[in-house]
Image (tube, rainbow, N blue to C red):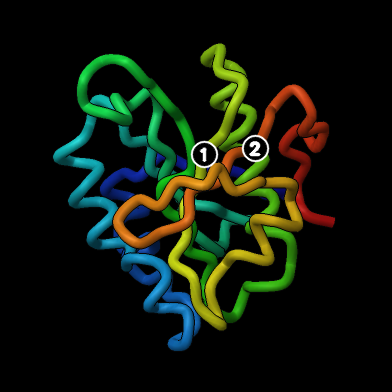
Amino acid sequence: MTTCLEEITSRNLDAALGIRVRPEQEFAVAPVVKSLAEAYVHSDSAWPRLIVDDGRPVGFLMAFLDIDWREDGTLFRSGLWRLNIAAEEQGRGYGRFAVNAVAAEIRRRGSKELYVSWEPGEHGPQNFYLGLGFRPTGEIEEDEIVAVLDLDRHLDQGRPPA
């Protein structure tokens, strides 16, 4: 199995737009089309990628890189903005691969923390993120729980799913 990230291009745009999470998860993550629109508007900080396994699109992620978190120049953060794993591909390690790939990119850029936020709910991603070692910061951003992963302690360096 060869899992990798691809930049979004005219060649794979339709594949990215075709990624759909399970219906009960739709409350927790925006569709890919909204993410790509936000990536266009925030091109200086958005990092959208298609997750591909053996040429087959299995998910989409978008990281935010060095955003001005407080909008006053006093706090910059990087993290995972969106993670959409195709409904039929969930449970195969692609989400873990995506988080590790974002962690590797953030490390490469010199940051030591990876942030994420999630919408609380029965079918939301909270247990997934907590299981990877994220810890809530106590912050709430737009009704979402904010959590952080210490990249100095996070040892899984972006290995592909087993």
Where is 84 relative to 107, above or below? below
Dividing the picture into quadrants, the one containing residue 32 is: bottom left
Where is 14 relative to 151, above or below? below
Where is 55 relative to 38, above or below? below
Dividing the picture into quadrants, the one containing residue 89 is: bottom right
Spot the residue most to the left.
Answer: 41
Whether residue 149 is visible to the viewer of this picture, yes or no, is yes
Dividing the picture into quadrants, the one containing residue 53 is: bottom right
Tell me the residue at 75%/57% (across/down): 131
Which quarter of the rendering shows the N terminus? bottom right
User: Is 58 on the left-hand or right-hand side of 29?
Assistant: right
- Residue 62, given in percent of the width and then of the height, sits at 41, 46
The answer to which of 88 and 117 lies nearer the viewer is 117
Whether residue 1 is visible to the viewer of this picture, yes or no, is no
Tell me the residue at 24%/25% (across/down): 44
Q: Amino acid at mark 2?
A: Leu
Q: Amino acid at mark 1?
A: Tyr
User: Is 123 on the left-hand or right-hand side of 42?
Assistant: right
User: Is 72 on the left-hand or right-hand side of 52?
Assistant: left
User: Is 6 on the left-hand or right-hand side of 89?
Assistant: left
Tell me how far mark 2 sits from mark 1, CA to CA: 6 Å
Residue 2 is marked as: none
Which quarter of the rendering shows the C terminus? bottom right
Q: Pointer 2 and pointer 1: residues touching (CB < 8 Å)?
A: yes
Tell me the residue at 44%/87% (across/down): 23
Tag 1: Cα neighbours inside 10 Å, few (<14), some, or many (≥20)? many
* Residue that badge 2 annotates: 149
Tag 2: Cα neighbours inside 10 Å, few (<14), some, or many (≥20)? many
Residue 115 is marked as: 1
- Residue 117, given in percent of the width and then of the height, sits at 47, 52
- Residue 141, given in percent of the width and then of the height, sits at 35, 50
The answer to which of 137 and 29 lies nearer the viewer is 137
